[in-house]
Amino acid sequence: MIENMRKYTGLMVVVLVLLAAGLILTMKPGGSGGGGAGNEFMQVNDVSLDQNDFSKAGKNTISAVQRLAQMQNYNDFFKFREFVGTLTGNAASETQSQLNFVTNRILLKQAAEELGLYSAPEVAEKYIQDNMFQGRDGSHDAKLYSSYIESLGSLGLKQKDFQQLVAEYMVFVKTRDLIGGGLTPSKVNTIAEDKLNRQDIGISVVSFKLADFEKEITPTEDEIKSYWETHKDKYKTERTLKLTYVLTNLDTSDEPKRPTPAADADPAAVSKQNLEYQEKLVTWTEQRKGHTKILTKIFSDFVDLVQDSEGKDFDKAAAAAKEQAGEDFSIVNTEAFTITSVPEQLKSLTLKNYQAGTQLIDLIFAKKFNAEDVYHNFDNFTVGRDGNVAIRLDEDIQPQVKSYDDAKDLASADLISKLAGEAMTKAAEDAKAKLTAAVADSKSFSDAAKEAELTATEMAPFNASTPPTEVTNAADFFRIAQITAPKTVATKLSTSDDSATIIYVATRTLTLEGDEALKETQLVEQAANSQKYWTFNAWINGLTEKAELKLPNVQ
């Protein structure tokens, strides 16, 4: 049992020191970077990283940036969020965003050096002292900085790693301004577009609903089967996984409960209860910290053994860890499950050091497992208050095309939707032509709609910033209306998955207020800044296209 394992505390300290010693960017050309099991995980041009390097340069560094916000140091957080967000780009999963970030960090460093842009750690430290961790009086808050650096230890990072990150941020700013600077957007077009968005537009609409047309369509068996034959790849079974996972997650049922005295309780008695509670909580917390250190050491040893054996010793290492930790180390073999039938325990685990809302099961299903590669067949995460989970893939059944009988109902619904959509669009186009002709013949839009037995809905004037929230497609209505002359029917329909809408523009007005010249100057500056980012992003994407990359498969 865990109570008998205090002998591991000293070992745990040694392990933490060794983990913290792995540098986030000690990435040597052609080498592993000095961390982890030493097996190559990814390569960008001549820089190779193993799993540990990747975690430190990716997930742990992103977590370090997020920690700035957690400490309410929002000024510095927003600077580095810009850096992380730009290099992360668009990603479909957490793992892909980390991969993008690490890849682009390396590419940016290499390309910046070719441009003659560098930033040494001592320069970065001066930047930190002069511009970061500022107190209320605007001066550097050494205590806040020290507290932040100390907090990075749990991520395996040290002060020199943060200095390196700041140095990269400084190079990022210099490179962004060099690549994207000096470009001037069209002042005339920028101001014209702004005025289009600021105008208040009053419209009337006639909408056709897909559901009304779906009621009238009943496809034959042959039509459904023909549609399924053409689109059968749409109808697949869900991906199914079977896993073995180990979990260290200490029970919290014995945590002291805060007293809840009655409103008329004796103040002296309440004070005594609170003091006793605080004393119990301190004792409980210290004991839990000790137990957690031991469990973390056991879990870390388990992970090392699995990685060193390339996954072959998972069961053996798990059994050994279980023998040491007892009931605080669980080994679970799941039945096969899909993303909609996840085992309750896995579903209930909350991730640490990830963005709010990120689910463990989403990360698991985002992985492309590979039985021949331990790094893609095995992964581990920090969960709960102070727990850890490691997973191994036992079976991965990829989606298969469903038979016609299994897919028939879905194919029938899709075919009905397709045919109804075509009928709806045609009806809307025909009605638009009639209404356009009637309005051109000096009839009001509402009268023309009544004659055509259509329902016209009038909408109060709004602009791009104030679309009516109760109207789902209001933003698209405005997009079309802003380039349509008043007292005319728009030439384009506003279409969505479930509707097609005719738009009549009644009024378009622009109210000028305040210092318009100042607004225009600020607007052009903002447009220039946006153009700078677009240009820099295109440049980064170009580096990626030209680079020699060996990257793991992720979803």
Image (cartoon, helix red, strand yellow):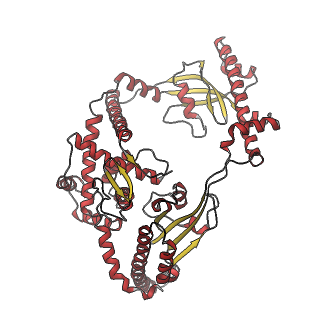
The answer to whether residue 471 is visible is yes
Along the horizontal axis of the image, is 288 left or right of 489? left
The answer to whether residue 218 is visible is no
x and y percentages locating residue 117 in the rendered image? 21, 43
Which quarter of the figure has residue 291? Answer: bottom left
x and y percentages locating residue 236 in the rendered image? 67, 48
Q: Is residue 33 above or below residue 270?
A: above
Q: Residue at x 57, y 40 (%)?
A: 469
Q: Residue at x 53, y 67 (%)?
A: 349
User: Across the whole image, how many numbered discs are drawn on residues?
Assistant: 0
Q: Is residue 434 above or below residue 425?
A: above
x and y percentages locating residue 505 in the rendered image? 58, 23
Residue situated furthest bottom in the rendering: 4
Along the horizontal axis of the image, is 547 left or right of 462? left
Q: Residue at x 26, y 53 (%)?
A: 166
Q: Residue at x 26, y 30 (%)?
A: 182
Q: Of 504 and 380, which appears nearest the observer?
A: 380
Q: Of 374 and 555, which appears nearest the observer?
A: 374
Q: Is residue 459 above or below residue 45?
A: above
Residue situated furthest top in the rendering: 441
x and y percentages locating residue 235 in the rendered image? 68, 45
